[in-house]
DNA sequence: CTGAAAGCGCTTACAG
DNA sequence: CTGAAAGCGCTTACAG
């Protein structure tokens, strides 16, 4: 009550009746043209005299006019809204994905609706159908594991909404997609270890339901065999992509005495962290006694000590590319491949840090 | 070309002309009532005979009718859209925040627009004004550091959009807000260490621009002094909330020989990770020689070994509460405190793990 | 308890 | 090159 304007006073003031936002009518009046002409100018359509265009632009600037997105949506064919559907346990994956989608959408004046979904829910198909009926999204981006679920794809297709999948494992060719080459990345990581003299390499397989788990294992096997090596069954462990399963594998590998591999390739970072945690507990020095590498380059890989050698997935770039495919879809001419066939592959990066040493 | 329905064939099919979504008119016709009555039923308004209500609901179900959100927005006073504005380097913070906001919004049929902002951009005020003019959001949630920027608050207020701030440090009383008690949390963490026999406690201060950094330091000081202890200046280090600054502090603390504190309170997890990384490098065993605690309970605190004792911020709950304040604002009666004065405080949790031992 | 009319702010299709 | 009319799918007053 003693400040220049207290909260109580502010509250007493009449609620500023939705601060007069100017509309297309205001601009048309000020510029002395029809609203149709204003519409043409705002949408950069042709067939407006340069002089008229300037007049309208000046009026719009003066009135700080911003076309109402909702009105444009209702009247027109586009909603300027893209949906990002996800159900992924990794915060960094989702945030990086979201950042890429939003970046591309902003370039075209689109906004992004974040729609987490429960991929385990039995009615996920209906949930998505309901979402798409309520809001006419101009496009949808699907990430794992949603992008591999038939009910999800069915629902989106039934609603007639264009969509792009990021890193799908199933239904190739069913939709536009962006991805990186998991197999090649695992292959190169294995080559990296081989190149440093490692021969006794263990491998932690990822969640068996994830397509990438199999691709990564394939890449590992390919490189080993090209090097004339056959992986030792006792050093191949099945994990679940979780820290706990990495810890478990570490126990199995280090706990029993017996031979130790000289390097362990965990097919995602979380499992690598688990292995490293167990190693530290068991007094196995990394990388001096055993080298460890991961896959994903999650933020934790720079937090853990030694910093983890891993594969960087271009998550933000994948997301940007996915949004780009969605938004530039209209411009495809007849000779170009169809939207559904579109596919972009982005490069990964092997990030060599401190968890590996040469033998 | 050999499968039951190839991509190429699917593309040739006429594009399913925006799969006939049913409208309020369709429902009204089928139910034999006016659209106004359908509207009443869909919005659970009173003054509809039970029989009519049932008739309309049946028709709506049959047609799988979903009110078009954009049309509702344009015609009515609400957009059913809430904006989450953020600019925070922590993925997990943003994702947890987003999850809480979305959870509450879904309960009321609202959707969430994720709008990352560049808090360093000179025109951030205009960017936000433009956003709010383009889409009439029903509310906005502001997180640090945006919630402490006058230009941001000015822009939102000028647009007349209700907003709630999460964990603001500045301008108390200027808006509705939710927060936890940083000072008390740091106080209790310090008491926890004292209770385990620690007296020589070092402290890593957070980024000086963050209000929480000062509150956490205050809580630490208070507990120390209540215990009759004065912190040793050489053990108080200024950090930046980053892993690197924690590493730096670790070097300053462990590198020089001389006395070691028995415990180090890093005022966020990232800095704690840095300290632990340096300790491991320098051969200082944690917690045997030095205990370390953090603040925030980021995902990394369960990845690092030993697992970090820290303070869990109820981020998702804070976000849920913020959205709840926004959405339930209308129902406040005259006797209740005004929306602007509203303030909710949520409890934190001290999570004791393995990075501390008794002395 | 129910409905006919007007209008939200735009775009579409059409006319000139 | 420009505009008048209709309409997107709803809600808001208002009338009965």
Image (cartoon, coloured by chain):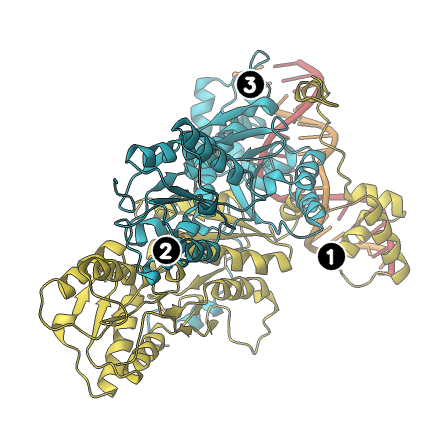
Chain colours: A cyan, B yellow, C red, D orange
Q: Do pointers 2 and 3 mark residues of a single chain? A: no
Which circle's residue, 2 or 1, is located before the other in the chain?
Answer: 1
Question: From this viewpoint, which residue is outermost toward the front?
Answer: A258
Q: Secondary structure at mark 2?
A: helix
User: Chain letter of disc 1?
Assistant: B
Question: From this viewpoint, which residue is outermost toward the top?
Answer: A335
Residue A242 is situated, as x and y percent measured from the top left of the image, at: 48, 53
Residue, disc 3:
A332
Choose mark 2 or mark 3, whichever is in front.
3
Q: Do pointers 1 and 3 mark residues of a single chain? A: no
Mark 2 surroundings within 10 Å by alpha-carbon count, few (fewer than 14), some (14 through 19), many (20 or more): many
The answer to whether A309 is drawn above or below residue D7 in the figure is: below
Q: Are marks 2 and 3 in contact (CB under 8 Å)?
A: no
Residue B290 is situated, as x and y percent measured from the top left of the image, at: 23, 71
Residue, disc 1:
B43
Q: CA distance from mark 2 to mark 1?
A: 35 Å
Q: Do pointers 2 and 1 mark residues of a single chain? A: yes
Mark 3 surroundings within 10 Å by alpha-carbon count, few (fewer than 14), some (14 through 19), many (20 or more): few
Residue B268 is situated, as x and y percent measured from the top left of the image, at: 31, 64
Residue, disc 2:
B146
The answer to whether B259 is drawn above or below residue A352 in the figure is: below
Q: Secondary structure at mark 1?
A: loop
């Amino acid at each position: 009550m003693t400040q220049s304007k207290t909260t109580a006073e502010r509250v007493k003031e009449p609620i500023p009746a939705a601060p007069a936002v100017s509309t297309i009518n205001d601009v048309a009046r000020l510029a002395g043209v029809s609203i149709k002409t204003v519409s043409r100018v705002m949408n950069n359509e042709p067939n407006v005299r340069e002089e008229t265009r300037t007049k309208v632009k000046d009026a719009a600037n003066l009135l700080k006019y911003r076309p109402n997105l909702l009105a444009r949506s209702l009247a027109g064919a586009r909603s300027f809204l893209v949906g990002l559907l996800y159900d992924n346990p990794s915060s960094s994956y989702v945030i990086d994905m979201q950042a890429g989608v939003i970046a591309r959408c902003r370039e075209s004046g689109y906004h992004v609706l974040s729609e987490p979904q429960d991929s385990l829910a039995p009615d996920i198909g209906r949930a998505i159908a309901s979402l798409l009926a309520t809001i006419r999204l101009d496009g949808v981006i699907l990430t794992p594991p949603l992008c591999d679920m038939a009910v999800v794809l069915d629902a989106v297709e039934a609603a007639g909404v264009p969509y792009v999948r990021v890193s799908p494992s199933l239904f190739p060719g069913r939709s536009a997609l962006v991805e990186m080459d998991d197999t090649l990345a695992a292959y190169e990581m294995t080559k990296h270890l081989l190149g440093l003299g490692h021969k006794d390499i263990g491998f932690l397989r990822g969640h068996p339901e994830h397509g990438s788990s199999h691709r990564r294992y394939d890449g590992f096997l390919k490189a080993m065999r090209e090097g004339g090596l056959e992986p030792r069954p006792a050093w191949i462990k099945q994990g679940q992509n979780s820290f706990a399963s990495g810890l478990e594998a570490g126990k199995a590998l280090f706990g029993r005495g017996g031979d130790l591999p000289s390097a362990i390739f965990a097919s995602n970072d979380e499992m690598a962290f688990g292995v490293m945690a167990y190693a530290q507990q068991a007094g196995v020095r990394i990388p001096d006694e055993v080298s460890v590498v991961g896959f994903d380059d999650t933020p934790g890989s720079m937090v853990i000590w030694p910093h983890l050698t891993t594969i960087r997935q271009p998550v933000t770039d994948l997301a940007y590319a996915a949004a780009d495919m969605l938004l530039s879809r209209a411009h495809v001419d007849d000779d170009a491949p169809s939207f559904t066939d579109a596919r972009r592959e982005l490069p990964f990066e092997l990030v060599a840090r401190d968890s590996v040493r040469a033998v």
